[in-house]
Amino acid sequence: MIVSDTTGLLFVHVQKTGGTTVQRWLEEVTPDARPVPGCHRHAGLTTILQAEPGLGDHLVVGFVRNPWSRMHSWHRMVRRWVAQVPDGEPLASLSHFRGNAFARRVARELPDFEDFVLRGTREVPRLRRPQVAYLRAPGRRADLVGRQETLETDLRVLAERCGLPPHAGGRWNADDEPVDYRDAYTPAMRDRVAEVFARDVEAFGYEF
């Protein structure tokens, strides 16, 4: 997450929704950009407001993504990291895995995408948390929810609303290989994602 007190902005960073691009842009255009002490970079709105209640007065912004695409992208990211580990070296030899128990677990126990979807969503709590859960807190919810699919358009809306310089384009931590996530799913996997992320599907109208 990123906070800018002069802009009155709180960005809640949901994993695999283009959030690294948003964060880098905010760090460039808001000189007072800061994290919330004691909170993970992917902390949800409830956790953030418990740590710093005054941020409830800020403009709360987040981004979401088609849940089937998001799960596929998440798994591909970890597999890309695994491919970067030198032969014979431990996972922790790559910075992405150091201090990241979740990524190490996925790399070791869920290397197959089908297992990641069917078994991972049952065994790993982070993998079954709906995106809406990050963007809502008791008595408060995000004021502006953009979409990874329309990231540049939504960033322009955010920039205009907050009086910030526009995003210059380009994405961080993006998968540059063109793939169709639908090809990676079996009917059982498709249905499992629909079940786990039913709240996201209902809230944002996503379809497989």
Image: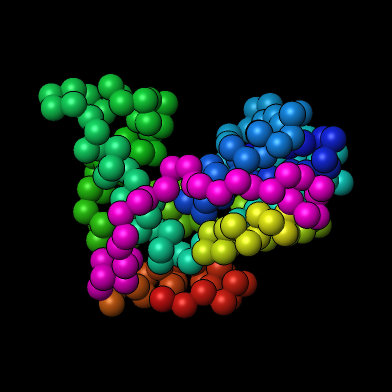
Closest to the observer: 57 or 2? 2
Is residue 177 in the magenta section? yes
- Looking at the image, how many numbered discs can be counted on the residues? 0
50 horizontally vs 130: left or right: right
How is the structure coloured here?
Answer: rainbow
Counting from the top left corner in percent of width and height, residue 109 is at 24, 44
The residue under the point 35% across, 30% down is 97
**Quadrant of the drawing holding the C terminus:** bottom left
Closest to the observer: 29 or 123? 29
Counting from the top left corner in percent of width and height, residue 30 is at 74, 35
Extreme residue in the left direction: 88
The residue under the point 55% across, 44% down is 21
State the extent of the magenta-drawn residues as a range. Answer: 159-186
The residue under the point 65% across, 27% down is 38
Closest to the observer: 103 or 3? 3
Counting from the top left corner in percent of width and height, residue 167 is at 64, 47
The answer, for residue 148, to whether it is visible in the render is yes
Q: Main secondary structure of the magenta part?
A: loop
